[in-house]
Amino acid sequence: MRNQAAGLSRRTLIRSLLASGAVVASGGTLAACGTKPAKKNDAEKAACIGTDASATEKKLNWSNWPLYIDATDDKKRPSLDAFTAKTGIAVNYTEDVNDNNEFFGKVRNQLQACQSIDRDVMVLTDWMASRVVNLGWVQPFDPAKTPNFTANVLKTLRNRPWDKDMNHAAPWQSGLTGIAYNGAVTKEVRTVDELLTRPDLKGKVAVLTEMRDTVGLLLLSMGKDPATVSDADYDAAIEKLKKAVDSGQIRKFTGNDYKEDLAKGDLAACIAWSGDVIQLAAEEGSKVAFVTPEEGLIIWSDNMLIPAPATHKANAEQLIDYYYDPAVAAQVAATVNYICPVQGAQEAMQKINPELATNPLIFPDSATLAKTHSFRALTEDEDKKYAAKFEAVSGA
């Protein structure tokens, strides 16, 4: 198992790459540039499907986020090696999904034109996954070829509005967005309103630069459901956020670099991601804790999708099904520390790491999951409009 405390988390690496300018889309063109992508009709979708060569080509190209799979110190990936040994399928695994918009910008022209992107599996976050599914840029997988997925995906991740038939997107990992606090410098923070108004926290609060996480929690604090957010609801949440910024309550907007400031006590509390807090707790002990706000949590997933022009669909289906074996899923979860989307993996984790098997941030109980909410899928126009309003307040 890779040492999580010593290593960068996936989101830390993403932020450092973006800040350094290391993440550049193909040809320097980002998703915001160019013409608006067109949604394909059923006939166009069918015409874009690549010819499956899996029967004669035992290979697979997979794009995923950095540091998001089980790995050893000598950079081996045990679960992938076992997959190849079991199936004979060689996997070219590339950690090149550093940002959803950046990746979309890199592949959008080819997918729009039904041209190969040299990938058979790509991993994108819910909101971007829903966009490419809606555009018709991914091909469905056959549920009969993925029985582990059909049987074992968490109930809370089934029949999502943008993939009701559960044949376009298989969650790779999930996570929770809630509140974290440093118990050495403040008492427990139980609600978003406490975070944004409590006098003892003034100037010691951070919120995330990820719009769906921060605004999603604010919407919940106002009794609004992020899954059905309207323009009026969104504007009210932005106004609430602006008030907390203008009052000096919020010290800054951050990626997951909040970890260091929270551990040191420079921040007393913040909006945080569950996987980060697991890592912090391992480093800092009980003084750093994750809280489920009384209003609820935001839940998100990163999803395995098969691009429409992919030419190894059957191989990709074998990969999806393999990673929904509870024993394999537990092996991955023991390294990445985000929510495992596979039923049965908690029992399998008992054999790997009994302590992690009881961690509610990796295996949330039903009461916790009942408090989770997802931000609804936005159109590209809505995304730009909402992002601009958020950036006007955050400066991100």
Image (spheres, rainbow, N blue to C red):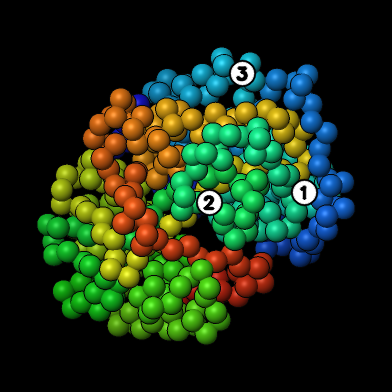
From the viewer's perspective, tell me whether residue 251 is left or right of residue 60.
Answer: left
Q: Quadrant of residue 337?
A: top left
What's under tag 2, amino acid-wise? Arg
Inspect this view and state whether residue 223 appears: yes
Residue 3: where, in percent of width, then height? 32, 31
Q: Nearer the viewer, mark 2 or mark 1?
A: 2
Q: Quadrant of residue 245?
A: bottom left
Viewer-closest of 386 and 217: 217
Label 2 secondary element: loop
Crowding near pointer 1: few (<14 within 10 Å), some, many (20+)?
Answer: many
Question: Residue 87: which numbered mark, if any?
Answer: 3
What residue sits 50% from the left and 43% below the top?
A: 153
**Residue identified by numbered label 2:** 158
**Residue identified by numbered label 1:** 111
Instruction: Give the CA distance from mark 1 to mark 3.
Output: 28 Å
**197 to 322, vertically: above or below:** below
Residue 268: where, in percent of width, then height? 21, 63
What's under tag 3, amino acid-wise? Thr
Instruction: Give the CA distance from mark 2 to mark 3.
Output: 27 Å
What's under tag 1, amino acid-wise? Leu
Label 3 secondary element: helix
